[in-house]
Image (cartoon, grey):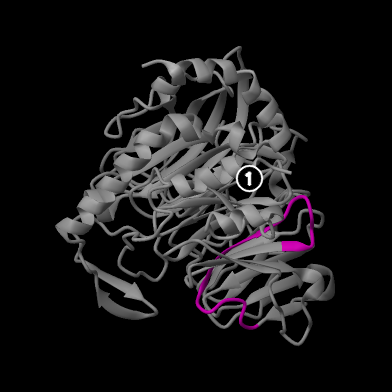
Amino acid sequence: MESDEAAAAAAAASPQASGGTVTPAPKKRGRKPKNKDESQEQISGGKMKESGKKTKQEEQSVDEKYSQWKGLVPILYDWLANHNLVWPSLSCRWGPQLDQATYKNRQRLYLSEQTDGSVPNTLVIANCEVVKPRVAAAEHISQFNEEARSPFVKKYKTIIHPGEVNRIRELPQNSKIVATHTDSPDVLIWDVDTQPNRHAVLGAASSRPDLILTGHQDNAEFALAMCPTEPFVLSGGKDKMVVLWSIQDHITTVGTDSKSSGSIIKQTGEGGDKTESPSVGPRGVYQGHDDTVEDVAFSPTSAQEFCSVGDDSCLILWDARTGTSPVTKVEKAHDADLHCVDWNPHDDNLILTGSADNTVRLYDRRSLTSNGVGTPIYKFEGHKAAVLCVQWSPDKASVFGSSAEDGLLNIWDYDRVSKKSDRAAKNPAGLFFQHAGHRDKVVDFHWNAADPWTIVSVSDDCETTGGGGTLQIWRMSDLIYRPEEEVLTELEKFKSHVMTCASKP
């Protein structure tokens, strides 16, 4: 049994857990910040709408809730680093761990910078110092300056990206190789170790990708996945297609771990036309969606099996061994556009989906039928705006996170759904932690496989601050998720000290 009381308190302690959340104006995706000098028109469901600006009262409410959250940081978190970004970022990913020390580890971090055109868009490779559990003092983690850059995050290399970076994915077999999506039909592959460091100034030529994956007929902006078992890449786009590639033909040697010097056949340079980069066509093109494909995911056990979700409200399962038609198509997986999907790495029957209907749904593929019928195992209701990202924990099979336009990053445990203590606390079933440190939509996050309870998350703060973004790296207190018996045994050691402090006048 987990420490339910601590978890319930953590969820309830979030200043946004009880409602009243300020919801950003609706957008088609909720991920595309406008340039600072653009009009306030937004796209929603294909129709133009005016963006409703927040009133002073609403802005004050956001600031008050943030202040409440900040006061709880020493109680809820083992470590937290806040890094102010000059430009919005739509994607953040952990890279390989570089070295380990007594109190902290150094690790690569990938993120994007989406500019207003005054300087080029970039893919940023940073070095991050990850403080080990139970090292940071409570007063230290609570004294961060939200307007400053964190000393734990240092820019290491900049790649000038040909267009906005909408999505970043690392190759599991060698996480120094990453794929990026931009506002074009192509997927770009980068070897971040061999790419030259560039200075992002107006007029600078774009860096040259190490490989270009072609095959989409229209822009492919968000749906992107790397296969955990083979060097395969999966993508979806506005052309309603799911496209599969193998980059094996253009890899001379790929190591079995991130320390390998595996490299892609390169024609890199200091810039120039990206068409000079080598390209590779698809292994398969899969058609079955009736609208934009918003996200894709590989099966954790098979490079031939994958799934996709889209603006047609469908969840589709595919198997490359049986052809290019859907194996299973759930016609109405949600009540609105689907934004995200993730396949459980510990149990290949469980698939998560997130939607503009504000919910996360859990499907068991064994209960899906070929006639398009599918009932979720459970519907998780804790967000007050469109869900933009879902991801399973790399450490525990029943735990996952979800982030949304309401500014919240929720941590759930499916094993807690039926527990009475959660219902008694009046929290959404399964919710045991809410990260409320972002003041605008949380567009992306990533669990750290090298330090499983550490998460990096990024918000686009254009709506609330007029520009920029916020990167946060955080780890909740282990008293929240550890087994209750362990927690009570540990707290017993401090009982006499607490009683002594409580008895003092």
Q: Quadrant of the N terminus?
A: top right
Task: For mark 1, give the secondary structure.
Answer: helix
How many numbered badges does the structure rendering display?
1
Relative to 387, residue 157 above or below: above
Residue plotted at (57% across, 83% down): 290
Q: Residues within 10 Å of mark 1 (few under 14, many from 20)?
A: many
- Could you say where residue 194 lies in the image, as x and y percent from the top left? 56, 32
Residue plotted at (36% across, 16% down): 505
Residue plotted at (61% across, 79% down): 289
Q: Is 372 situated left or right of 314 in this image?
A: right
Relative to 173, residue 231 above or below: below
Residue 175 is a magenta residue: no
Majority secondary structure in the magenta region? loop
For badge 1, the amino acid type reads: Asp
- Could you say where residue 258 lies in the image, as x and y percent from the top left? 69, 32
Q: Nearer the viewer, residue 486 or 474?
A: 486
Residue 483: quadrant of the picture? top right
Q: Residue furthest right?
A: 321
Q: Is 220 situated left or right of 230 in this image?
A: left
- Could you say where residue 318 lies in the image, as x and y percent from the top left? 74, 71
Q: Nearer the viewer, residue 444 or 63?
A: 63
Q: Residue furthest top?
A: 102
Q: Which residues are magenta?
A: 331-350
Q: Which residue is mark 1?
A: 4
